Image (tube, rainbow, N blue to C red):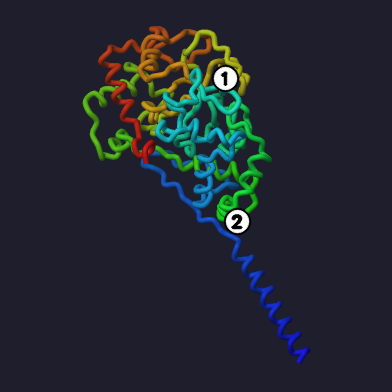
Amino acid sequence: MRRLTAVVCAGALLCLSAWMFTSCEKEKYSPTPYEITIPRYFPTALNIPADNPLTEEGIELGEKLFHDPIISGEPSEGLCCASCHVKSAGYDLGGDNPRLENGRPRGAAGVTHHNALPLCNLVFNRQGYLWNGSVAGEKNIEDIVRTAITLPEELNASEDQVVAAISADAGYREMFRKAFGDEEVTMDRISKAIAQYVRTLISAESKFDHYLRGEATLTDAELRGYILFTTEEGADCFHCHGSAGTPLFTTNLFYNNALTAHPEDPMDRFSVTGDEMDHGCYRAPTLRNIAVTAPYMHDGRFNTLDEVLDFYNSGLQSSPYASPLMHKLPDGGACLTPSQIADLKAFLNTLTDEKFIQE
């Protein structure tokens, strides 16, 4: 009888062990692949690293982390990625942001060196990131995220602090399991998740997009503004910001736009390349949602779109470093009439994507 009992117990333990092993196997999770829907007329080459493919679970985790102060050095202050990349401002700073200080974002322990840039259509950018292009090549959006978390003038957190805080949250551990296969929380995975989310921020539903697709018509003023935008005889904007053939409304390249006669910024494009002609050069930011992405320029010196238009119309500054594409430089600007400026602004307003900034 005892032998029978022992055999039964041994069998039960064996079954229990097998069940536990099977349960552990079931806990392994394979994320659901997510495919970017490329808008009509957009580039087809995407910036998605092979070691960080997009998944539904990774994007969901990244969106939560993007909006959660848990990744900052002082979570009680509510500071997070979304503090300086506001949805209603096209994922840019926004002119009414309480963190706006002298044209730049104020982070946990100071003001950033440059103005913020909108997190819009970055998945189509293969030319490098930030105003000076210092993140390029093997560096990518993941590197920007990791740096932003630790920089004092941004989120000012230590990697160990962030990993510990997230690891202590059972809900987050489950999200990491679904996004990466197990519950381990690392800075590498945090950066990858947020980068996945950022790559899904695609703006392609503005009035101008609908016009290109034959779904809307532009007003006479908007059409006149479009012609001014795309011609050298007009405002000559298209060399740096593209046109219908460049639906990102940026070349993602770097130019000295004659903003100052004496460029002295230690973090301009020259600081990256060492090329003398790159003094005062900065990325041409996208003009998508330009009506809501104030302040403007790398240093945030212009608070309104009207100020920007005034600068390009009559405020260009000559220097040896000004881009040769600044064809209006000899005249000090485009020299448009007030009605032409109004038309140009009307066109720029068609680049606002209400779906992108509201839904």
Q: Is residue 22 visible?
A: yes
Question: Which residue occupies the foreground of this view, 219 or 126?
Answer: 219
Q: Earlier in the sequence, mark 2 or mark 1?
A: 2
Q: Write down the residue under mark 2.
A: 181
Q: Is residue 156 left or right of residue 353?
A: right
**Residue 228 figure quarter:** top left
Q: Write down the residue under mark 1.
A: 268
Q: Is residue 137 visible?
A: no
Q: Which amino acid type is shown beneath numbered disc 1?
A: Asp
Give how far across and how far down residue 199 sits, in percent. Answer: 49, 41
Give how far across and how far down residue 36 sits, in percent. Answer: 45, 47
> Where is the N terminus found, in terms of image quarters?
bottom right
Q: Going by the picture, which residue comes out furthest to the bottom? A: 1
Residue at left 56%, top 55%?
A: 178
Give how far across and how far down residue 34 sits, in percent. Answer: 48, 51
Question: Which residue occupies the foreground of this view, 33 or 96?
Answer: 96
Residue at left 49%, top 13%?
A: 322
* Mark 2 crowdedness (10 Å alpha carbons): few <14, some 14-19, many ≥20: some
Label 1: which secondary element: loop
**Residue 232 figure quarter:** top left
Q: Which amino acid type is shown beneath numbered disc 2?
A: Gly
Q: Tell me if residue 209 comes above or below residue 300 in the rendering.
A: below
Label 2 to label 1, Cα distance in Å?
41 Å
Q: Is residue 87 left or right of residue 265?
A: left
